[in-house]
Every structure is written in C-alpha cells, then in structure tokens.
Amino acid sequence: MGALMKIIVAGAGDVGHYLCQVLSEDGHAVTLIESEDSTADEVEERLDVRVVRGNGASALCLSKAGVESCDFFMAMTAHDQLNIVACSLAASLGAKTTIARVHDQVYADASVVNYQKHFNIGVLINPEALTAVELAKHVRNPERMAFEDFARGEIELQEMEISPDAKAAGVALKDLSLDAGIRIGYVERAGELIVPRADTVLRAGDKATVIGTPETLLKCRRIFSSISPSSRRIVLYGATETAVSVIRRLSDRRFKIRVIEPDIEKCKDIAEAFPSVTVINGSATSLRLLEEEQIGDADYFMACTKDDEENVMTCLQAKKLGVAHVELVINKPDYEQVLQNISGFLNFESIVSPRRVTVSEIKKLVTDKNYSVIGSLRGGSIEFVELKVGAGSPAVGRPLRDLRLPPACIVAAIVNGSGAKVPGAADSVSADDRLVVILEKQMAPEVVKMFVK
C-alpha cells in the first residue's frame, strides 16, 4: 500500500463514513470533522479514527484537526458550497492535496469561471457522474472487450477488433484521418502487442486499443468495425442527477431514451434540457403504466431514484415484463451486501452504489508515490498511471513530440479545470495538469520523473 498517510475527512454521511472506515482499515491516520454530535458519537464508537467536532468550513476547526500537516483533505458533506470552501481553506492552510465532493454539474463547467482552479482544489469528485459511468458502460460496450474509464469518465479506452471489410483494414494509421481527439494506444496481432507508428498498417482481426472521449469513440467505431451497432432502447426511472448524467453519456442517436418520473416539474426540466428524450409523467411502480408503455420491449431498464425499495421493485417488474438487462442504484449501505449476494439469482445486470464508486475513485489517489496506478492491461504488464505535473518539470510548455518518451509510453489524457482531452504530438502540458499515462510497468519511475520534478 505504501507509507501511512495523514488524512482529514469533513462530513460523515454515507460517503464520508465509509471513506473513514476504508482508509482507517488500510492503516492511514484518519481524522473526521463532523458537526452532528450523534454522528460523531457513532463514528467514535465504531471506527478507529480521531473525531473533531465542528464545521469543516471553519479555519479554526481545520487548524484544530491539523490540516497544515495533512497529506489529503477530503470534503464529503452533502453540501457542494461547504465542500468547496472547506477545500479552498484547507489548501491555503497547508493541505497537500484536496478533494471536494460536488453534485452540481455547474462546478464542472469552466466556460465562464474555472471553479477548480479559482478555489485551488486538487480534485472534484461527482458521485452521480461516477455512478452514471458504471451504469452506462454496459450499454456503450455490450461486447465486454477491454474497457476502462479515465479522468472520472471523461476519457475512455476501448478495444476494437478490425473487421475484414472495415475502413481501417489494410490502411496505414496516417491515412485513416482519425479525429484529433482519438489515439491508437496498442495493436494486438496474433497474441503479440505492437506499439503502432504512423506507417503501421492495420489488418483484419487486429485488436486496436483506442483512446478518446466517449463522444468521439462512439463516432469512430464504424472506422474499425463494419458491423453497424444496433439501436438500443433505454428506460430510466427517476429524473435524478444520476439519470441526467446517464443521458449525457448516451447522447448518440442510436440510443433511444425514455425517462419515467412522477414529478411533473422534473419532467418538464428533462424535456427542455434533452429534446430527443421521451419523458413519461408517472411512476414505474405501476405495472399498468409499464405495460401501456411497452417497457418489456426495452433493451435496458435503469432505476436511478433515491428510493432503494422502488428501484428494486421496478427492476423486478421490468425483468418480469421481458427487459433483457436491468440495472439499479442502491443508496443505503444496509442493502448493498444483501443485493450483491442475490443479484445473480435476480438476474440484475448491475447494482451500483454511489458511495462505493466514489470511495473506489478516491482510493486510487491516496498514495505516497508521486503517481497513482489507476488500471492495467495484459495481466498488469501495462499500467495506467495518473500523475500531477510539477511546476519545475522540464516537460512544462514543451510539445509532447519533443519529450523523448519511451516507445511504449502514451500520454492518453491531459486533465485540468477546463476538462479532459486526448492530446496530440503538438500539445504541451502545464504545471498542475493531471496526466493519464499508459506505459510498461517497469517504465513508471523513469517516466514519472520527467513530469513530477
């Protein structure tokens, strides 16, 4: 795991409580800041963490918790503004890395103000968006070939097999005219892994590892595969933040989406924001409604409400009516394990817990190394690492083509407050950018040294 980290968590709701539990079990020194006495009492009694009672957005309280010497400060309350203020203060007082939990997509929009940079926050984590990534990936990649998400779902890696009559078959990469936001990472041919060059000719049967944004990958599939993906019918129950994030991830024309929502005002909001989505005002707990709307003909049914009982019951009804794949969100910790244990019996495609996906994402960042391993390929011989570019790095301001990176090393994504992008050879990195780099495992220390100085 690495050296023991000093970590402060503000807020002990479902996510914060679970985060404290996991990090303390991993051996880290965890301090919790919590304003509710009953919650603080429960944590003190059940977990091996230090508890400071007070407001996480108070500089005095942060100092009392020892923020000036902490490795990570994580604001996990249910209030976005409190989390942002707490992280901004913590950074000013000396916290090495700050992580803010935010729900509102407003804070991811840097078109007017870059909130992350303005408030000097290390990482913004959106549990609903992470949950949507998990739900949507089954729809986006039903073939179940290699599939990874980077940069909190803003960049994807997919493995695509070249069809004999595809546009890419028999063509050199330089002649494919790929979108600027697309990179070919590796090509697997007859069991051998090749790092492609501009003159590499793709052959039928090759498996190409393709990196890009979700939107560009959907567009480019037809270049590599002549098989046109069939349209898919998706029904979402509940016009929640998670459902909205799922809609954004399935914005391609081949995804036909319907949303069922009991609240008429929320129905109007969805209809106005997404004109191509069909919105049905009603409750999916009504078997009559499901039958009238012919929900049984859908390919996917996703229950995204905040009510776990409704999510389970509506998925059971959808399955009974003939929906091939059902997925649901589970919010209550008490239900998670029970449902995971019987999910095979119920034949649910996926059960996603916002607190678990959030903590899983945060755990990738908690390391004493100057980079985090966030995934791997080929049994671990190839790693995906995330690192932060240091102000003194010789790479700052230089085009990637001039950096003399090892042949099998690919900068797959540059992530900053403006979002994430797949860089080209002419792109350069700036101090404080976060990079996702794909490389051979043994190369990690050497490559990281180039960026982190």
Image (cartoon, helix red, strand yellow):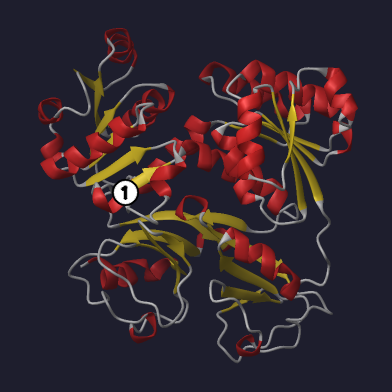
The answer to which of 197 and 255 lies nearer the viewer is 255
151 left or right of 96? right
Counting labels gives 1
Residue shown at the point (47%, 62%) measured from the top left: 383
The answer to which of 206 and 32 lies nearer the viewer is 32
Above/below status of 350 relative to 121: above
Q: Residues within 10 Å of mark 1 (few under 14, many from 20)?
A: some
| Amino acid residing under circle 1 | Tyr
Q: Secondary structure at mark 1?
A: helix
Residue 329 in sight here: no
Residue 214 occupies which quadrant of the picture?
bottom right
Q: Residue 412 appears at what percent x and percent y? A: 47, 68
The answer to which of 270 and 344 lies nearer the viewer is 270
386 left or right of 48? right
Q: Residue 37 appears at what percent x and percent y? A: 26, 9
Q: Residue 374 appears at what percent x and percent y? A: 45, 53
Above/below status of 328 relative to 40: below
Residue ID for mark 1: 115
Q: Give the position of the C terminus as an image quadrant.
A: bottom left
Q: Residue 112 appears at what percent x and percent y? A: 36, 54
Residue 431 in sight here: yes
Farthest bottom residue in view:
199
20 left or right of 157? left
Residue shown at the point (39%, 21%) measured from the top left: 13
The answer to which of 145 and 131 lies nearer the viewer is 131
Q: Give the position of the N terminus as an image quadrant.
A: top left
Above/below status of 149 relative to 68: below
Residue 166 occupies which quadrant of the picture?
bottom right
Residue 385 occupies which quadrant of the picture?
bottom left
Residue shown at the point (15%, 35%) measured from the top left: 67
365 left or right of 163? left
